[in-house]
Image: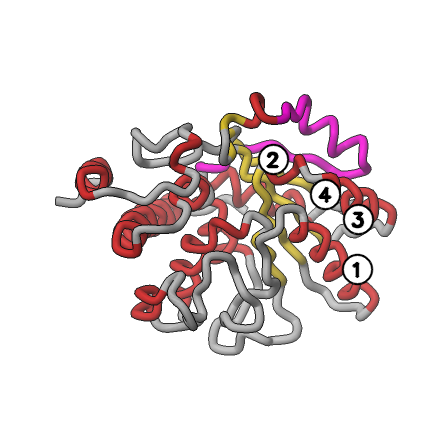
Amino acid sequence: MTLSAARIDFLNEKCHQFRVALIKLLYQIQTGHPGGSLSAVEILTALYYEKLNIQPDNPAYPDRDRFVLGKGHAAPMLYLILAEKGYFSKTEMNTLRQINSRLQGHPCAKMTPGVDLSSGPLGLGISAAVGMAAATKLDNKNLYTYVLMGDGEIQEGIVWEAAMAASKFKLDNLIGIIDCNGVQLDGTVEEIMPLGNLADKWKSFGWRVIETDGHDIQAVSTAIDQAKAVTGQPTMIIAKTVKGKGVSFMEGKNTWHGKPINEQEYSAALRELGVR
């Protein structure tokens, strides 16, 4: 579906607001993962504002779409969107990563409304998502399971075991998205463990592959629509992104995977984001 110009403007403004809110939040708590959160902003915004069938006032609604944040370290951005959608109070964001908070450094399904799966160990997300998608097929439910992964994450062997299973069971209700920013904790993906031709890899495992610009709201929305039209096989959307997108000195830098933001950096980031 082609979004109207007004809707695209609205969504892009939401993305800008989320970036500003993330910088303020992570500066305040002096912890968290800015790089991988900023790269996923448009993907998460397109999902939660355009595609997911959810009911924030009824998080356990049984026929809701499921979402799994495989790259669990991007939890701060997910929480900001969940709070904006009304799953919990925005003031609760101030408790992020504090003892006894519902908002831990990685998503916790038992504690946090709107979180369908606790995640953190890389590769666990898609593995569980395969099971969730298979279960909903067995239950004859007409819903989708989405899983967002990092490109560093798919270096894990467990990811490819899950990929084989999803293909075997023809899980066309499973849509994977790779936040493909090319950078991980200790360096670039190419330096740590090159992935080669990622599209060919997923195709060889029986998946339909769609490549898109992960910072283009319309492109992400269209890719998801195309994925939902696929039958008889799971789909992987390879979304090209930039780690730290929106803050020039964070962009493409592995040091910003999980670095606290100091006062000087905080002021510079807000200036770049147009906050005075």
Q: Amino acid at mark 1?
A: Ala
For mark 1, what is the residue?
A: 134
* Side of 81 relative to 177 (left or right): left
Decide if residue 213 is in sight here.
no
Magenta region, residue range: 193-215
Q: Position of residue 78 (x, y in %)?
A: 45, 56
* Side of 146 relative to 269 (left or right): right
In 3D space, how far apart are the residues under numbered discs 4 and 2 (Cα atoms)? 15 Å
In 3D space, how far apart are the residues under numbered discs 4 and 1 (Cα atoms)? 16 Å
Quarter of the image for residue 140 reads bottom right
For mark 4, what is the residue?
A: 159
For mark 3, what is the residue?
A: 166
- Crowding around mark 4 (Cα neighbors within 10 Å: few <14, some 14 to 19, many 20+) is some
Disc 3 is placed on an element classified as helix
Q: Position of residue 211 (x, y in %)?
A: 61, 32
Disc 1 is placed on an element classified as helix
For mark 2, what is the residue?
A: 238
* Residue 235 higher or lower than 48, as above or below: above
Which of the two discs, 4 and 2, labels the residue nearer the N terminus? 4
